[in-house]
Image (spheres, grey):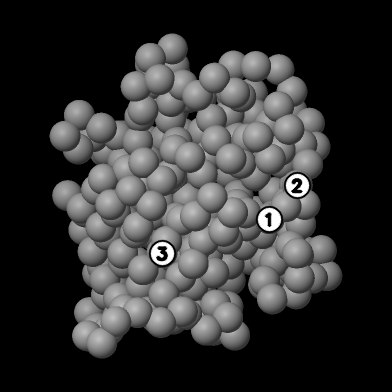
Amino acid sequence: MTNVRSGPFLFSFRRRHSFVLRPSSFVIWFAFATLPIFGQPAPSAQQILASVRMIEARQQIDLQGQLRENDLVIPFRLIQNGPLIRYSFTNPDEVLQLRLGQNSSRLDLVSDTGTEKFAGGKLNQKIRGTSLTYEDLAFKFLYWQTARVLGEENVRTRNCWKLQLRAPSRESQYSNVLLWIDKASGALMRMEGYDWNAQIVKRFEVVSAQKIDNRWFLKQMRIEELQPGTNHAQSRTYLEIKK
């Protein structure tokens, strides 16, 4: 297991690879070329987000994973074919399909009779009692139009663009989201979600990575549900990816 907190290891291939936390499927990988936008000064927030979405929609993967919270362990299978991503859960069976478009994403429920759009009123529900919600799984905030670059800030010794994204409506559990994206590589280093009282309520943080078939993927990510407005974690879920 490779500890993601060790900055020199992660970015020792900086000129040949780009390190990216893939938002919708939570997979970390190294592409063979850094997107040009991340080597240029002062891109707009929408340019940065468009580049992240473009990377996301190119992948072909088939991996096993699990959600783990205390003694609760929930296995799942993750399959991606370009812009189409499927999460398959068992006990009981549940298949979710995420379709990534140019201007929006769509989360569907898949059954033997076909697919139907996931009900918007259920997006804020937790997935099988964990800290992860269906809205988190879809990462719809990457398509929010109201976004700005707040400035630069270091995360784990890396120089990052700090972005603020504002929700278009109260349909989201979050009023706004903060992202830290590495300027050199395009890596999404941190995510924080804020409720409609402008208090922090959720934090995502990568813990470790692993190499599978000569590509880097997520091994473990911690998802913390916070007591509103504090750094006190009410619950912690670990999302873990296996071969």
* Nearer the observer, 57 or 167: 57
Q: Earlier in the sequence, mark 3 or mark 1?
A: 3
Is residue 91 placed above or below 137 in the rendered structure?
A: below
Is residue 42 placed above or below 76 in the rendered structure?
A: above
Q: Earlier in the sequence, mark 3 or mark 2?
A: 3
In terms of secondary structure, where does tag 2 sit?
strand
Residue count near mark 3 (Cα–Cα under 10 Å), binned few <14, some 14–19, many ≥20:
many
* Nearer the observer, 78 or 36: 36
- Contact? badges 3 and 1 (CB < 8 Å): no
**Residue found 26% across the figure and 71% down from its top:** 88
Name the residue carrying label 1.
144
* Residue 129 place in picture, x, y as percent: 44, 81
- Quadrant location, the N terminus: top left
Identity, as a three-letter code, of the amino acid under mark 1? Trp
Name the residue carrying label 2.
147
How many discs mark residues in the rendered view? 3
**Residue found 80% across the figure and 37% down from its top:** 150
Residue count near mark 2 (Cα–Cα under 10 Å), binned few <14, some 14–19, many ≥20:
many
* Residue 15 place in picture, x, y as percent: 43, 12
- Contact? badges 3 and 2 (CB < 8 Å): no
**Residue found 69% across the figure and 76% down from its top:** 171
Residue 98 tag number: 3
Identity, as a three-letter code, of the amino acid under mark 3? Leu
In terms of secondary structure, where does tag 3 sit?
strand
In terms of secondary structure, where does tag 1 sit?
loop
Q: Is residue 208 visible?
A: no
Identity, as a three-letter code, of the amino acid under mark 2? Ala
- Contact? badges 2 and 1 (CB < 8 Å): yes
Q: Is residue 7 visible?
A: yes
Is residue 123 placed above or below 178 in the rendered structure?
A: below
Residue count near mark 1 (Cα–Cα under 10 Å), binned few <14, some 14–19, many ≥20:
some
